[in-house]
Image: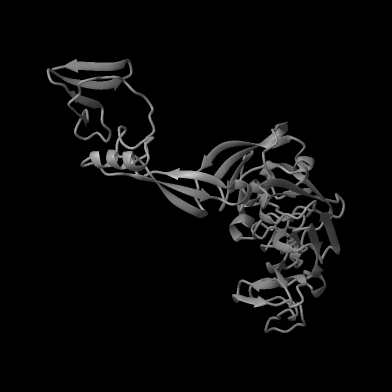
Amino acid sequence: PGGAGGAPSAPRIMPQLALLHQDSRYHQHAIAHSVDLHKKSLVRYGDAAPTSKSGGGGGGKVAGGAVPPPQCDRLKKSRVDGHSGRIMAVPPAGWNGPATPGLRRASRGGGGAAAGGVGGGRRGSDEEDGKPAARPPPGAGRTGGVLILGQRQITYHSTAEGVTKVLPLPGDAVLLSCDRILTQDSSSSRAGGSSKNDDGGCVRYLIGDERGRVHLLALTRHPASGKIGGLHLDTLGRSSIPTSLNYLGCGLLFVGSQFADAQLLRVLDEPIPSPAGPDESDEDAMMMGRSTYLVTCEEYTNLGPIVDFDLLPTAASQGGADGLSGADAAAADGGAAGLVRQSMVITASGTGSDGSIRLVRNGIGMSEYASVELGGIKGMWNLRARFGDGDDAYLVQSYVGETRVLGVGEGGDEEDDE
């Protein structure tokens, strides 16, 4: 499509699929292929750019309106060090989410919107009203880079920018999870709001490792060029071993764990004192400094993984075999005629620092909100005030000499005797 005054605008770049693979010599490599959404096919790294039937050389526009990036901009990084295990896309400067027609109509004078993934975006005019687009930020229209999380280091690489940054990590801890922190500007731009640079010159990620530590990784950009200039890592605190991190906004972080209870954490602006745990190493103390930025709001029970379990028999009644052994216990159990013995399951749950012993009972869990001592009740049931009501309003209590109907109103308890 043409831009202002009929001038052709820069074509959109196909979304890029970044892969991290390992060869037979245990060398790791990162490479990106293009995804042709129109033809539902993959344009591999070494393939020439497809052309339209109307002619043109390599790099011509395809029917779907998007082209692969130039060969010099296609992401490739050989022999990545640091025992890498995860890869994350880092968007280019000015990337505001997928370029969909709805977003382009909602964003007046919007800048470059990437085709998705680590792909770049389209620069040009507004297609709906012909108004010239706002000046794109530095680096808009380029393909982005990748963040490679290793056991000994974190590597950022962008072939288009010609930038490779390495951040060594203290100790050997496998990084299990990662989640990007989206700013308010980024969320509003994806909803069709302001299309300015969504990261404010700093791309941030939350990273969790196998020791239960949660880190904040910040990638800073150069103001003039928009290229990544540095990597900075801060340790926020400890949680359950995080196999999944999801930043919910407003300082709330959900930690999903396969090895312990899931947690809902609040990230504080200022650190608070944190006592040393029984399994805290000198390395952890050096990184966190006896302080933490994380506070637990809620925990969600997870018994898995159950490494081992055993049955613990219990007495049939309070007057049974508690505290007895041998023949006395057998005699006490035999005297409890008609009562069924119930066993508890003792589980060894979790692994590593999150290992715990859990007791599992068979029954119905109850949470008590209020209690009133009323002796001599023979029967009790609930009633609705009207037949069409969805909720019950009264509690009927049957005694030997009377029947009481209790209801809760605005003024307090109401009681009727019959």
Residue 266, image quadrant:
top right
Report the residue at 28% width, 40% height from top. 331
Total residue callouts: 0
- Quadrant of the image containing the C terminus: top left
Instruction: Residue lying at the far front in this picture: please name it.
Output: 327
Tell me where residue 211 appears, x and y as whole percent.
Answer: 68, 49
Image quadrant containing the N terminus:
bottom right
Say which quarter of the image contains residue 270. top right
Left or right of 293, for residue 260? left
* 330 versus 155 height, above or below: above
Q: Residue at x 77, y 76 (%)?
A: 25
Relative to 158, is 406 on the left or the right? left
Residue 213 image position (x, y, % from top left): 69, 46
Choose between 67 and 125: the one closer to the eye: 67
Classify residue 285 as left or right of residue 309: right
Q: Nearer the viewer, residue 70 or 394?
A: 394
x and y percent of residue 236 in the render?
71, 41
In the rendered image, the vertical position of residue 159 relative to residue 227, given as above or below: below
Q: Is residue 227 visible?
A: no
| Residue 414 visible to an observer of this rendering | yes
In this view, 276 is above or below 124: above
The image quadrant of residue 41 is bottom right
Report the front residue among 196 and 176. Answer: 176
Of 412 and 290, nearer the camera is 290
Colouring scheme applied when the structure was drawn: one colour
Could you tell whether 340 is left or right of 5 in the image? left
Measured as percent of width and height from the top left, residue 104 is found at 64, 57
